[in-house]
Image (cartoon, rainbow, N blue to C red):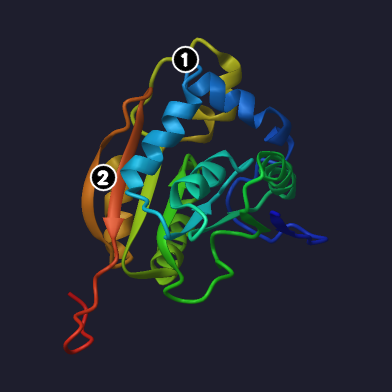
């Protein structure tokens, strides 16, 4: 059964929190991907190189669609958690997870202080979330993602790249008017958090771009980082 941590107050964050958008979020994702949301989620999981048995964190998980797909990829021996600053998003993610019969741990938390110990996850996912954060908060988020990664663990960041003309003002309101983050800025942010860039480029859907980074591995002979 999915687990949701109930909290009376949403944790404080300097980022944009999509409280009222929770009821429309899945429709907006469908609109953004032109009906290819399933393909988009599988593409993200492929880019993150998720494998059976891994532990995964979805930062800014929204209504939980990606976290559920990630759990299916890592299988019964893998573990997936999702955090979001919006309690409404977490509630919908819990309901969706329960309906799908997929066990995912959802928590109402913020990216500035991830509620997990050091070296806890093999992979951390951040999709369409960084553009909601001020620069300093993005950098803090990157440091937190690095902290919870195991040696050799991966961070996959996906966000809007260059501007694309939108015919739908509704889509523009929920996404592009909130901003975008250049790939070069994401790369610099992850490098600043002591992560090594592995790959970057276009996702293949709209103007979405990705950056895949890896935490330094630990040398087994002397414990030093490579």
The outermost residue toward the bottom is 222
Out of 181 and 51, give the one closest to the viewer: 51
Callout 2 crowding tier (Cα within 10 Å): few <14, some 14–19, many ≥20: few
Q: Which residue is mark 1?
A: 166
The outermost residue toward the right is 8
Quarter of the figure that contains the N terminus: bottom right
Out of 80 and 102, give the one closest to the viewer: 102
Instruction: Point out the tag, 2 or 1, that comes first from the N-terminus.
Output: 1
Instruction: Give the image location of residue 209, x and y in percent.
Output: 33, 35
Location of residue 59 with respect to 119 vertically, above or below: above
What number is the disc on residue 3?
Answer: none
Answer whether residue 206 is visible to the viewer in this image: yes
Location of residue 1 with respect to 37 vertically, above or below: below
Location of residue 88 with respect to 179 vertically, above or below: below
Q: Which residue is mark 2?
A: 184
> Going 48% across and 16% down the picture, which residue do you hit?
34
Instruction: Give the image location of residue 94, x and y in percent.
Output: 71, 47
SS at mark 2 in the image: helix
């Amino acid at each position: 059964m999915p687990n949701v941590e109930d909290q009376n107050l949403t944790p404080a964050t300097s980022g944009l929190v999509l409280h009222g958008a929770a009821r429309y979020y899945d429709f907006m994702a469908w609109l953004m991907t032109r009906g290819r949301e399933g393909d988009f989620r599988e593409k993200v999981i492929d880019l993150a190189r998720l494998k059976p048995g891994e532990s995964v964190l979805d930062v800014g998980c929204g209504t939980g669609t990606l976290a559920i797909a990630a759990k299916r990829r890592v299988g019964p021996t893998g573990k997936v958690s999702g955090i979001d600053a919006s309690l409404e998003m977490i509630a919908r993610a819990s309901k969706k997870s329960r309906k799908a019969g997929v066990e995912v741990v959802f928590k109402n938390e913020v990216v500035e202080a991830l509620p997990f110990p050091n070296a806890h996850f093999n992979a951390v996912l951040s999709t369409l979330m960084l553009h909601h954060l001020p620069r300093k908060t993005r950098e803090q988020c990157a440091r937190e993602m690095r902290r919870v990664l195991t040696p050799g663990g991966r961070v996959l960041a996906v966000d809007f790249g260059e501007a694309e003309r939108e015919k739908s003002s509704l889509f523009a309101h929920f996404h592009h008017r909130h901003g975008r983050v250049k790939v070069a800025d994401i790369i610099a942010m992850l490098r600043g958090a002591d992560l090594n860039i592995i790959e970057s480029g276009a996702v293949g859907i709209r103007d979405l771009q990705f950056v895949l980074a890896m935490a330094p591995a630990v040398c087994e002979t002397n414990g030093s980082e490579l």
